[in-house]
Image (spheres, grey):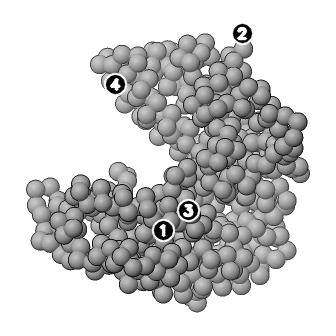
Amino acid sequence: MDGAKSALLTPLLKNDSLDSSNLKNYRPVSNLAFVGKIIEKVVQIRLEEHMKKNKLDMPFQSAYKKNHSTETLLIRVVNDLLIASDEGKATVVMLLDLSAAFDTVDHNKLLDILYREIGVSGTALAWFRSYLSGRCQRVRVGTHESVDITIKFGVPQGSVLGPILFNIYIRSLYATVHSQSFNIHGFADDHQIYKAFQSAIEHQIMTEKIPQCFSEITKWMKSHYLQLNPGKTEIMVFGNQKTLSKLQIKGVFISPGVCIRLVSVAKNLGFYLDSTLDFTTQIKKLKSSCFNKLRHIAKMKKFLNIQQLQQLVSALIFSNLDYCNAIYYGASSKAIKQLQSIQNRACATILGLKRREPKSEHLKKLHWLKVLERIEFKILLVTYKALNGIAPDYISDLVKYYNLSGSRSPSLQTHVSKTSYGDRAFISCAAKLWNRLPEAIRTSPSVKTFKTQLKTHLFKKSFPT
């Protein structure tokens, strides 16, 4: 397998907007031999089967796992934030980012975790030891290549096994955080740690609980040879306006002499969250980005037909407009209008319409669901998957049947909310929207059939005859 252990590393800029002269802004993706990846895939399948059979999976880690995504993670986290706000609580959220996490994995530590926590032993453990040892890589920039260097630490980014091995390596971090009575959700090396609290105990949370939690995390990091990226670690407090107005502390000392100031807006897994969850910044950024892309598409119109333009809009505009749109549910009419303006502009770009010309009939001709119905579509699709065992457990936990007897498709339990914040939470809106659906749609035999029937149903709602 020696040839399969050699990697050609091509540095890729993480984001086009980042400074290309700063080496920290590059992701070192390894190009590995095809045969080696085939072998890794076989091992990955067997390892995942072993972990599933023995219930060794980490339910709150969403990266590199079937039916999990950044969307499902954010749906659950925002649900929890809204429910806490509904109860008059504030929620402190710490957004943690690890520095070069994949590159600092200690091989001996990983092998010990595989043996003691996952139960890998004998020939299988020997294979992993061989897989991790003796790896080498060289860097290519343009037409220039470096000499080969031996890799003594880390798991290769771009490999099949690297991601699942990294998840296994950090599995005990979740138990460490839970022991401090904080919630945690992670996506690879990005983690959100949060805790709801009454405003009356703000001082205890900010001066005792958070520093103590950070202290335990720091100890864990040291024992696993990992380090937090201080430049990307942010702390926010979410809540309704009334609750937030009662809070006084503006920063947290995570260690002696190290204070992190609270921020009111932060980008979390590609989505901007603000402290009152009104999505003002997210929608502003989204609108600016989409309009800029539409201007570029308009310049290419004379070279493309309508079908090709629709494909471009779907790939470049709707993929962004629909990302995490489930959490827009219950947003202000102004916010929805801003989102709808993106779709209207896309319609005008494709069909060459005037800016002020009504778009509804043209949207109908293009067979596009309007923004509100697209939001409902996403919520109901996630609900269908949760009820049919193809969604993360942390989503399925939010949707429960009220009564399993007497109906092919029983209703879901509804959450009793005190304010509009509770109404917006996934646990509330999912049940409400699901219970309104015709039984024929709820009992669809497959995701494909459900999506087809649901779109037809919502299309009639968008464009009543």
Cβ–Cβ under 8 Å for marks 2 and 4:
no
Q: Earlier in the sequence, mark 1 or mark 4?
A: 1
Cβ–Cβ under 8 Å for marks 2 and 1:
no
Q: Residues within 10 Å of mark 1 (few under 14, many from 20)?
A: many
The spot of residue 12 in percent (x, y) is 29, 57
3 or 2: mark nearer the eye = 3
Q: What label sits on residue 465 in the rendered view? A: 2
Q: Earlier in the sequence, mark 3 or mark 1?
A: 3
128 w.r.t. 342: above or below:
below
370 w.r.t. 427: above or below:
above
Q: Which residue is mark 1?
A: 167
User: Which residue type does callout 2 highlight?
Assistant: Thr
Name the quadrant of the C terminus.
top right
- Real-space Cα distance between discs 3 and 1? 14 Å
Question: In the image, what residue occupies the spot 29% across and 19% down?
Answer: 303
Q: Earlier in the sequence, mark 3 or mark 2?
A: 3
Q: Residues within 10 Å of mark 3 (few under 14, many from 20)?
A: few
